[in-house]
Image: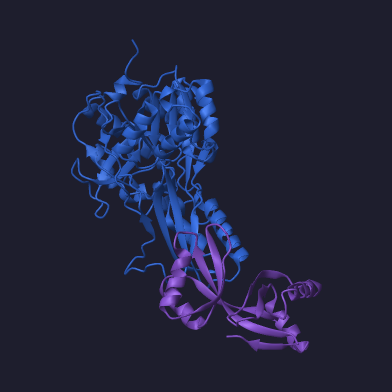
């Protein structure tokens, strides 16, 4: 009989014991981070030492860490180990402004693989599975993250990477893929391609889809399960925390267990930064407990969610997070990619032919997210070739920056609606909540 | 005698969507502006429709007020004695190394006469040379 859990002792650990483990790991993490040029002085200032940590509540003595801190300390300012111990970095996109960099030691890489393998095991994947990855490889943590985890699990990995749906179809047929890792919108897109090519997705060997990286509704998940004739599990990851492998739905499909042996989880009011009552909506704040190259304390994820109170029938004692309900900042997720309006704004500023006003509209066309960017020409030019070139160049420049290609619309100067106070830059018409 | 008109033409930015062209004509009609020339190509996504209208200033105002992007530009109108003359003009432009951006032929509302309307990549240079060659250059509108 195969066992239910990857690591039964940890996954079903009683709360008191789990919290004791968290305290122990928090102490260790503080010890490591004391070497960091970023955290060291902060700890000294606040009298934070490993010895002074007695309970999980002591986390509230720490200040919050934000994405801006990562940007300000680009590239290696948040390292807690000497760089010769770092074996990999993952960086966010962007050629203008400061990207963010996450560092990993060998131990971090192995730990990450183990956590995601645990997640895969939780949803029923085994070393007999054939796992195909549709995530881009390279800087995307969804690529290598799933790769290493699937190998750790012992499964046969098909590192197909992003795009080229016909190739994915061929691999699914030729290699007998049993599990697919993809963003929810691609799950529907790929199924459509299969159907267009006379292949019923339900007739393939795929029995499980690991979906995540973009918000999606229960209705969307059910639709994906129906068109594939397979189970689809919501997978939560974040590059700052490692990558995929932070939280996963169990077979109950009622909330994602977040691995609390690896993270201290807080839900706070995004305005006051005070913890909310358990079960209330708030911003997810995470502290790493098992990372050494770049541990992060009270990292503000800007994702809004809530804890699902009570015990899960699966027996896992790690708390469950509900479906994410938006952001406490202006970040958008389009085709699985994180995008900030400021990235687009910076590109627009490079063109004196355009005013500084713009409007991003997000729509769902068919199964896909589409972004339209309205920009104002300072003056319409009576030259079609010129407009074509400007359109093409702007589109290409923005794609370099945000990794997806928007549709560019030239609108008359002054036609983008102005609002009082902060300019509305994004209109999201998509239905995925 | 070579008669050349300096014409103020309206270029209207059109999105490739249903009713876009009709909308422009409706707006102009409602504003009491008449159209004596129009040219539209089969481009994708968007197009520049070139128009000759009775009141270019008013046309711009009313189109911009309706959220339609437009701009006035100067184009050259050459009165043709016959349609065969088009070949002569084109050969001459090629000889003088002028490059043509776009061109259309219209009556300019004049009844029987035909005008060749065109924009060159170097329109200003053309007018300079025409003046020096003592052509008659008049403003059309």
Residue B56, percent from left and from top: 52, 81
Please indicate whether residue A112 sits to the left or right of residue A234 in the image. right
Extreme-right residue of the structure: B95
Extreme-top residue of the structure: A1
**Pick the front one: A125 or A64:** A125
Colour pattern of the rendering: by chain
Residue A174, percent from left and from top: 54, 21
Residue A12, percent from left and from top: 26, 23
Please indicate whether residue A247 sits to the left or right of residue B90 in the image. left
Residue A199 vertical position relative to residue A309 in the rendered view, above or below: above
Q: Quadrant of the N terminus of chain A?
A: top left
Residue A195 can be seen, yes or no: yes
**Pick the front one: A27 or B10:** B10
**Pick the front one: A5 or A132:** A132
Residue A351 vertical position relative to residue B128 in the rendered view, above or below: above
Residue at (40, 77) in percent of width and height: B30
Q: Quadrant of the C terminus of chain A?
A: top left
Residue A158 can be seen, yes or no: no
Extreme-front residue of the structure: B112
Residue at (47, 56) in percent of width and height: A343
**Pick the front one: A123 or A228:** A228
* Chain appearing in purple on the rendered image: B
Residue A339, percent from left and from top: 44, 51
* Chain appearing in blue on the rendered image: A
Q: How many marks?
A: 0
Residue A315 vertical position relative to residue A268 in the rendered view, above or below: above
């Amino acid at each position: 009989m195969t066992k239910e859990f990857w690591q039964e002792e940890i996954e079903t650990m009683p709360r008191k014991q789990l919290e004791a483990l968290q305290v122990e790991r928090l102490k260790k993490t503080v010890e490591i981070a004391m070497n960091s040029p970023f955290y060291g002085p902060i700890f000294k200032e606040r009298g934070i030492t490993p010895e002074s940590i007695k309970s999980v509540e002591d986390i509230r003595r720490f200040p919050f860490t934000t994405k801006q801190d990562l940007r300000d300390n680009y590239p290696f300012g948040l390292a807690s180990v000497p760089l010769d111990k770092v074996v990999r970095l993952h960086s966010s996109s962007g050629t203008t402004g400061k990207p963010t960099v996450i560092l990993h030691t060998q131990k971090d890489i192995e730990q990450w693989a183990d956590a995601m393998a645990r997640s895969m095991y939780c949803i029923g994947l085994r070393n007999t599975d054939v796992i195909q990855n549709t995530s881009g490889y390279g800087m995307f943590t969804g690529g290598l993250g799933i790769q290493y985890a699937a190998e750790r699990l012992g499964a046969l990995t098909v590192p197909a990477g992003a795009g080229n749906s016909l190739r994915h179809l061929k691999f699914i047929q030729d290699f007998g893929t049993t599990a697919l890792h993809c963003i929810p919108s691609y799950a529907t897109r790929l199924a459509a391609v299969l159907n267009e090519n006379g292949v019923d997705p339900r007739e393939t060997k795929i029995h499980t889809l690991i979906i995540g990286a973009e918000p999606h509704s229960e209705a969307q998940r059910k639709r994906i399960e129906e068109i594939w004739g397979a189970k689809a599990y919501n997978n939560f990851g974040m590059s700052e925390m490692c990558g995929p492998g932070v939280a996963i739905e169990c077979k109950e499909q009622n909330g994602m267990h977040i691995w609390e042996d690896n993270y201290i989880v807080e839900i706070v009011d995004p305005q006051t930064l005070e913890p909310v009552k358990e079960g209330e909506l708030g911003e997810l704040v995470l502290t790493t407990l098992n990372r050494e190259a770049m541990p992060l304390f009270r990292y503000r994820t800007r994702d809004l969610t809530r804890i699902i109170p009570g015990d899960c029938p699966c027996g896992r004692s790690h708390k469950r997070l509900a479906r994410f309900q938006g952001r406490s900042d202006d970040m958008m997720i389009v085709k699985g990619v994180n995008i900030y309006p400021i990235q687009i704004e910076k590109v627009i500023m490079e063109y004196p032919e355009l005013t500084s006003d713009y409007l991003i509209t997000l729509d769902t066309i068919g199964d896909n997210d589409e972004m339209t960017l309205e920009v104002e020409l300072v003056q319409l030019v009576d030259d079609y070739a010129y407009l074509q070139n400007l359109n093409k160049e702007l589109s290409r420049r923005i794609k370099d920056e945000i990794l997806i290609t928007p549709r560019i619309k030239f609108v008359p100067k002054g036609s983008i609606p102005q609002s009082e106070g902060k300019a509305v830059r994004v209109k999201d018409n998509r239905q995925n909540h | 005698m070579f008669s050349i008109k300096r014409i103020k033409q309206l270029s209207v930015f059109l999105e490739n969507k249903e009713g876009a062209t009709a909308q422009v004509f409706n707006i102009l009609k409602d504003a009491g502006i008449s159209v004596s020339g129009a040219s539209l190509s089969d481009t994708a996504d968007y197009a520049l429709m070139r128009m000759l209208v009775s009141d270019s200033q008013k046309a711009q105002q009313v189109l911009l007020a309706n959220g339609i992007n437009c701009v006035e530009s100067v184009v050259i109108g050459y009165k043709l004695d016959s349609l065969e003359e088009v070949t002569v003009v084109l050969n001459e432009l090629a000889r003088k190394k002028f490059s043509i951006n776009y061109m259309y032929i219209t009556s300019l509302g004049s009844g029987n006469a035909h005008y060749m309307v065109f924009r060159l990549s170097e329109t200003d240079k053309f007018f300079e040379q025409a003046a020096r060659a003592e052509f008659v250059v008049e403003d059309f509108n």
